[in-house]
Image (tube, helix red, strand yellow):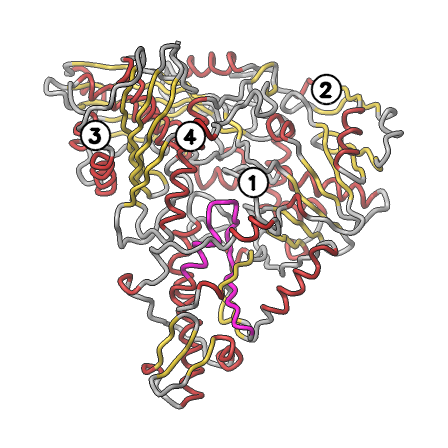
């Protein structure tokens, strides 16, 4: 892999990250200034939420009776605003209609993700890390409202009832939260509060309307693309066609005559064309003539990468998990099976490509962005302009999807926008806001990808069909190595935990087990992608375990169940999906020449277990139709069951897109795909019927945003094998 080195651009970003690591985390105030069309809306919001009563960082109660929940996590379609607000409203006993949600400012001290240590939305942790924190926040506000009422009415707090946003006493006294807000603000903040018994929940576990639904339905929701500021310019950037290449020379003579174009700026990442509109900027970029210096560029293609991966797979890697004596287990086996798997690079392909609005003044930097990683973006942006993080204001807006892309390790597109603003300042335009817009093609070819992987598995069965040895070797890029700080936390003894999750913690009982890893350095930029390591480990482990069940002549669910002792959540979802899918009943026959099959897979990610049964039809021409998916999930308490179901359905659709179509191929050091014509996603008519069943639980909530995604591909592949007898070991799924 000698030629496969990280590019100088990526190394520069790493150095920037390391340099900035010590300055992350200062608090700020959210400053939100839009054009005239939205100014009235913002002013009304400010007036409605003028807050005499803000007992903590997460709750504000206005005199107008509005309860505002401050959400520290990005709303990117996954329902976070609704889930977080539900937790607060439950403990506050607020009426759902009086609850509003707004994004928290970038302030790591107050708003960090308690499971990660930074202000970050990711890892399906938004509800899980906020559960106790927000219950206490709501209960604290409630206690202070009750204390205020008790003091005014001269009654015992124990005699006061709170329901639906109204505080009342049996003697006939009543007051709304707004009427008590000013008095409550003067009450001592309790150091300890009692939270509800789950049996008393009235909102949690129930279906309540989403808090973002109305704004998104009426077009008033603010995404980055909607931001319009006075005198704002728009920029697009010409990026190198080969990863890591740099500008050698540029001819912008043809750009100067294009109406609306104001500046052509050279950046570390390419050439920016800045204009009065997107279309003018794009026309300007199209007219540029750029020669790229390929000496620093990546030159491999997909075939070269996998050739090297296969060679690496022939020798031991860094040990991620070892138990028993694998060699001994294989030596006495009655039957041995082997399989190799290959997984392509994948694009995030969110509906809203990357974009960011920046305004740089003499003493402040203001950013508008669907921000997923405030701690990182604030620190790196500050470093880029020589300011302190406290001078950087981040206005977190809605994001039109992300799937990990907006939580860039090196804040790539944010820093690109900052760099443009900095260049404008040097050209006498300090204070002029600029909106950076990436087209779909930019996002597909100049962005980041789920790493490509090669897996090699070998397993052995004894005479009774029980697994006695399991060896799993993984070859693929480390995501965490792009950040020295993250590498220090997540890479131990040469093993990136995100590369082996789902494999190193294999739940099945294996007396002899070895999982090892090679993490070659490759010049393709990679990043986490919805469900991260489980995107590939779930497929290889769940299809291979299915092969073992077949070799042992055992039912796939019964085979799994026998190996899952002690894994209550896995067993719960397996039992539920077996029942709801009518697993024991034969499938209805297809049309003449069609073959039908049913497959199962179960996997845990982000502390949530998901089992899925897929039913497929293979047509005469070997094209595939996924007819039905039955999904069972154990995620602890389902704060909002409707959103849990939506996330399971969405995760299945997202995972099915990748399983059937997803592949970024590299040719001559650059991505070949550019848009949805050559990187197709699942169409509505291809979406199967999905049934979601939630395991009842009183345990604390766990993640739901990602855990459905990795399970669908192996369930479908196992169904194809049941229908055709063919085992498909590479993605995307292709029948000859």
Count of marks, rendered view = 4
Q: Quadrant of residue 632?
A: top left
Q: Are marks 3 and 4 in contact (CB under 8 Å)?
A: no
Where residue 190 sits in the image (x, y, percent)?
41, 75
- Please give left or right for residue 273 compared with residue 627 in the image: right
Please report whichever mark, 3 or 4, sits nearer to the chain's N-terminal start.
3
Instruction: Look at the picture and state if 484 lies above or below 597.
Output: below
Foreground disc of the pair 2, 1:
1
User: Which residue is located at x 50 percent, y 67 percent?
Assistant: 67
Determine which residue is flagged by label 1. 406
Let me know if residue 636 is in the magenta part.
no
At numbered mark 3, what does the secondary structure look like: helix, strand or loop? loop
Q: Do the residues labelled 4 and 1 touch (CB within 8 Å)?
A: no
Question: Real-space Cα distance between discs 4 and 2?
Answer: 44 Å
Res 493 visible: no
Res 68 visible: yes
Question: Real-space Cα distance between discs 2 and 1?
Answer: 28 Å
Please report whichever mark, 2 or 1, sits nearer to the chain's N-terminal start.
2
Q: Do the residues labelled 2 and 1 touch (CB within 8 Å)?
A: no
Tell me, for residue 293, which label it has, or none.
Answer: 2
Tell me, for residue 583, which label it has, or none.
Answer: 3
Determine which residue is flagged by label 4. 687
At numbered mark 2, what does the secondary structure look like: helix, strand or loop? strand
Please report whichever mark, 2 or 3, sits nearer to the chain's N-terminal start.
2
At numbered mark 4, what does the secondary structure look like: helix, strand or loop? loop
Foreground disc of the pair 4, 1:
4
């Amino acid at each position: 892999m000698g030629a496969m080195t990280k590019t100088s651009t990526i190394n520069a970003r790493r150095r920037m990250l390391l340099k900035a690591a010590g300055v992350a985390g200062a608090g700020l105030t959210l400053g939100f200034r839009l054009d005239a069309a939205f100014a009235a809306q913002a002013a009304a919001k400010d007036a409605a939420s003028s807050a005499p009563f803000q007992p903590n960082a997460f709750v504000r109660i206005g005199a107008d009776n509005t309860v505002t929940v401050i959400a520290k996590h990005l709303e990117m379609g996954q329902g976070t605003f609704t889930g977080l607000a539900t937790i607060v409203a439950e403990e506050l006993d607020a009426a759902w209609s009086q609850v509003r949600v707004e994004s928290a400012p970038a302030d790591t001290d107050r708003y960090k993700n308690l499971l990660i240590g930074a202000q970050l939305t990711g890892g399906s942790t938004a509800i899980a890390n906020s559960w106790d924190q927000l219950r206490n926040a709501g209960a604290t506000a409630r206690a202070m409202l009750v204390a205020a009422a008790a003091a005014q009415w001269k009654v015992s707090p124990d005699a006061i009832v709170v329901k639906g946003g109204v505080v009342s006493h049996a003697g006939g006294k009543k007051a709304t939260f707004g009427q008590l807000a000013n008095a409550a603000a003067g009450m001592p903040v309790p150091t300890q509060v009692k939270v509800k018994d789950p049996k008393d929940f009235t909102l949690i576990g129930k279906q309540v309307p989403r808090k973002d639904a109305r704004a998104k339905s009426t077009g008033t929701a603010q995404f980055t693309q909607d931001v319009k500021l006075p005198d704002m310019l728009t920029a697009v950037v010409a990026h190198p066609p080969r990863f890591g290449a740099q500008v050698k020379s540029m001819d912008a003579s043809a750009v100067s005559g294009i109406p609306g174009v104001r500046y052509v700026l050279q950046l570390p990442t390419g050439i920016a064309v800045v204009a009065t509109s997107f279309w003018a900027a794009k026309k300007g970029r199209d007219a540029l003539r750029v020669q790229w210096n390929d000496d620093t560029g990546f030159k491999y293609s997909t075939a070269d990468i996998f050739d090297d991966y296969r060679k690496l797979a022939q020798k031991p890697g860094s040990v991620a998990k070892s138990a028993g004596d694998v060699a001994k287990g294989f030596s006495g086996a009655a039957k041995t099976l082997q399989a190799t798997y290959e997984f392509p690079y994948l694009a995030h392909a969110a509906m809203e490509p990357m974009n960011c609005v920046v305004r740089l003044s003499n003493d402040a930097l203001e950013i508008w962005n669907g921000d997923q990683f405030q701690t990182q973006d604030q620190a790196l942006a500050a470093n880029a302009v020589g300011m302190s993080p406290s001078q950087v204001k981040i206005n977190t807006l809605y994001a039109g999807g992300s799937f990990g892309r907006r939580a860039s390790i090196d804040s790539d597109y944010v820093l690109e926008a900052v760099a443009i603003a900095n260049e404008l300042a040097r050209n006498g335009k300090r204070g002029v806001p600029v909106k950076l817009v990436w087209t779909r093609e930019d996002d597909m070819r100049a962005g980041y990808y789920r790493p490509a992987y090669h897996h090699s598995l070998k397993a052995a069965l004894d005479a009774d069909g029980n697994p006695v040895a399991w060896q799993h070797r993984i070859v693929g890029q480390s995501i965490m190595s792009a950040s020295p700080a993250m590498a220090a936390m997540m890479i131990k003894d040469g093993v990136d935990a995100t590369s082996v999750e789902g494999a190193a913690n294999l739940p099945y009982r294996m007396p002899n087990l070895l999982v090892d890893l090679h993490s070659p350095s490759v010049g393709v930029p990679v990043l986490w992608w919805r469900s991260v390591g489980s995107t590939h480990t779930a497929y290889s482990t769940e299809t291979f375990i299915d092969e073992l069940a077949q070799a042992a002549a055992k039912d796939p669910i019964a085979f799994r169940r026998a190996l899952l002792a002690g894994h209550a959540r896995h067993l719960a979802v397996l039992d539920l999906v077996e029942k709801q899918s009518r697993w024991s009943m034969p499938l209805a026959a297809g049309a003449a020449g069609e073959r039908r099959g049913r497959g199962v897979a179960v996997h845990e990610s982000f502390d949530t277990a998901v089992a899925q049964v897929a039913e497929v039809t293979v047509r005469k021409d070997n094209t595939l139709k996924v007819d039905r998916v039955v999904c069972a999930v154990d995620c602890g308490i389902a704060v909002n069951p409707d959103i849990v179901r939506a996330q399971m359905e969405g995760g299945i659709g997202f995972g099915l897109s990748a399983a059937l179509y997803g592949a970024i191929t590299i040719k001559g050091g650059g991505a070949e795909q550019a848009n949805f014509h050559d990187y197709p996603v699942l169409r509505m008519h291809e979406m199967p019927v999905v049934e979601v069943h939630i395991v009842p639980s009183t345990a604390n909530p766990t993640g739901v945003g990602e855990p459905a995604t990795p399970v669908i591909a192996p369930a479908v592949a196992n169904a194809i094998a049941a229908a055709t007898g063919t085992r498909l070991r590479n993605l995307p799924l292709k029948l000859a």
